DNA sequence: TTAGTGATTTAGGTATATCTAAATAAATAT
DNA sequence: ATATTTATTTAGATATACCTAAATCACTAA
């Protein structure tokens, strides 16, 4: 049976997520940026992951994740997201505070721990950022969703995720009163600059730039 | 500020616990047995811990933990025991299944995580094995407790801890119906071999050898 | 009081995960 | 078509945490 170290798990998760985002091969530099390590370290790691056959690695031509690799990556993502739900729902963490801690918790090795945690949390299907939690078999059920700026005037929906989940952006959202789960209605779209006015939970109106709107995903 | 690696934390915890048990210097061999590593590896680690001044290390003469070292050890023990409470009370782990998982969880670095976990669990003072949980400042309030074989006939009490917390022993206790929290009464003590008959929760009588009785601690 | 035994340390090796600096391959621009 | 730039890899270094084998220290028993 293949075993991965913590570092290998982290690299593989990053490769999987970069693949999903771009739907093609992932470059050494991309991974280096994502992992905040030097490209030289990435080359080293790619060689190791290639030997373990969780990625397909052709020198100088980037990597593709294998089916086996996807399983490992999805298992790590499942753990990460379940811990994020735990931190937010049970320990009252703010949704922009969970990433660092969840990144440590996700490496705890215990299948039964994750099963029990899942059960304890009521088998959640989405994490606090609205991202889907893969099930035990790696199946992911994603929701159809649109960025706010693509919703028609008077269209309604529920905020389910954000594209940019940087701490700064999440704090901004909290500040203006937008949060995962909020029900929104698009009131007005300004032709000139694409900025948008929305109604949150039928009581508060928020005005946001097109850039912000494009980063907030809504289930319609 | 001093920082310890996971391995250093584990060694320091072991050294602290061996010190408390024996109230004197701890030998390389003792640590090697406790940590299941070779004496040569222990020597290596003692040099490092000595340099970080969490232990006082004189070659060939064993080690003593420093005040600074105690703080670190107690912090690790606090985390370990809080996670054990979580695993047993919230995730329905059996009390003999928690050690391995808690040993991984205890190394997650986040002060706020432990504060929140403590609060979420209702500030427990004892772990599932009845061992006291140090508070944020490293203070430990232990309960007065006696092994069953030192209780007089007709004496009563509540099981609060076990000395030998090996998985095999814990399973044995579960099997005969003894558990942490059980109220007991000593019914009879056989002179010949020191074996003892006790009444558990006013409904079930258990017969146990002197050796078993000596391993079960009762708050009187 | 010294030889032997057991405990402990040192020396040197493996594996992981990072780095910097140098070398080299691929992509781009003139 | 070649020179330049950028991306990537290799080589060699550091730090952690283990190991085995050999050397050395401390204690004890005759």
Image (tube, coloured by chain):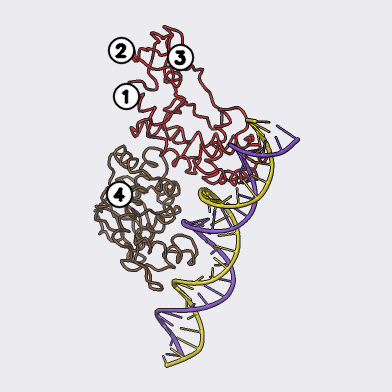
Chain colours: A red, B brown, C yellow, D purple
In space, the residues marked 3 and 1 are separated at their CA atoms by: 20 Å
Q: Which residue is mark 3?
A: A149
Tell me residue B68's x, y (percent). Answer: 30, 58
Picture residue at 43% right of the left edge, 18% below the top: A213
* Number of marks in picture: 4
Q: Which residue is mark 2?
A: A203
| Viewer-proximal residue among A61 and B85 | A61
Marks 4 and 2: in contact by CB < 8 Å?
no
Q: Which residue is mark 4?
A: B133
- Give SS at disc 1: helix
Marks 1 and 4: in contact by CB < 8 Å?
no
| Viewer-proximal residue among A58 and A84 | A58
Quadrant where the image shows the N terminus of chain A: top right
Q: Is residue B182 above or below residue A13?
A: below
Residue count near mark 3 (Cα–Cα under 10 Å), binned few <14, some 14–19, many ≥20: many
| Viewer-proximal residue among D3 and C3 | D3
* Pointer 4 and pointer 1 on the same chain: no
Q: Which of the chains bears the disc numbered 1? A: A
Sequence-wise first label, 2 or 1:
1
In space, the residues marked 4 and 1 are separated at their CA atoms by: 38 Å
Q: Which of the chains bears the disc numbered 2? A: A
In space, the residues marked 2 and 4 are separated at their CA atoms by: 46 Å
Residue count near mark 4 (Cα–Cα under 10 Å), binned few <14, some 14–19, many ≥20: many
Q: Nearer the viewer, mark 4 or mark 1?
A: 1
Residue count near mark 2 (Cα–Cα under 10 Å), binned few <14, some 14–19, many ≥20: few
């Amino acid at each position: 049976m293949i075993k991965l170290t913590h570092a290998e798990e982290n690299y593989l998760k990053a490769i999987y997520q970069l693949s999903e985002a771009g739907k093609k091969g992932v470059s050494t530099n991309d991974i280096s940026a994502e992992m905040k390590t030097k490209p030289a370290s990435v080359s080293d790691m790619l060689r190791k992951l290639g030997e373990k056959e969780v990625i397909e690695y052709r020198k100088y031509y980037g990597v593709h994740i294998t089916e086996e690799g996807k399983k490992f990556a999805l298992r790590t993502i499942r753990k990460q997201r379940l811990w994020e739900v735990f931190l937010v729902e049970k320990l009252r963490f703010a949704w922009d505070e969970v990433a660092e801690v969840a990144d440590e918790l996700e490496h705890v090795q215990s299948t039964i721990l994750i099963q029990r945690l899942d059960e304890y949390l009521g088998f959640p299907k989405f994490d606090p950022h609205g991202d889907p939690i893969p099930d035990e078999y790696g199946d992911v059920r994603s929701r159809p969703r649109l960025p706010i700026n693509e919703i028609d005037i008077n269209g309604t929906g529920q905020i389910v995720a954000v594209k940019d989940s940087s701490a700064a952006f999440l704090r901004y959202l909290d500040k203006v009163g937008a949060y995962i789960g909020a029900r929104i209605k698009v009131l007005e779209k300004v032709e000139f600059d694409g900025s948008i006015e929305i109604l949150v939970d039928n009581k508060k109106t928020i005005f946001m730039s097109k850039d912000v709107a494009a980063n907030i995903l809504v289930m319609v």
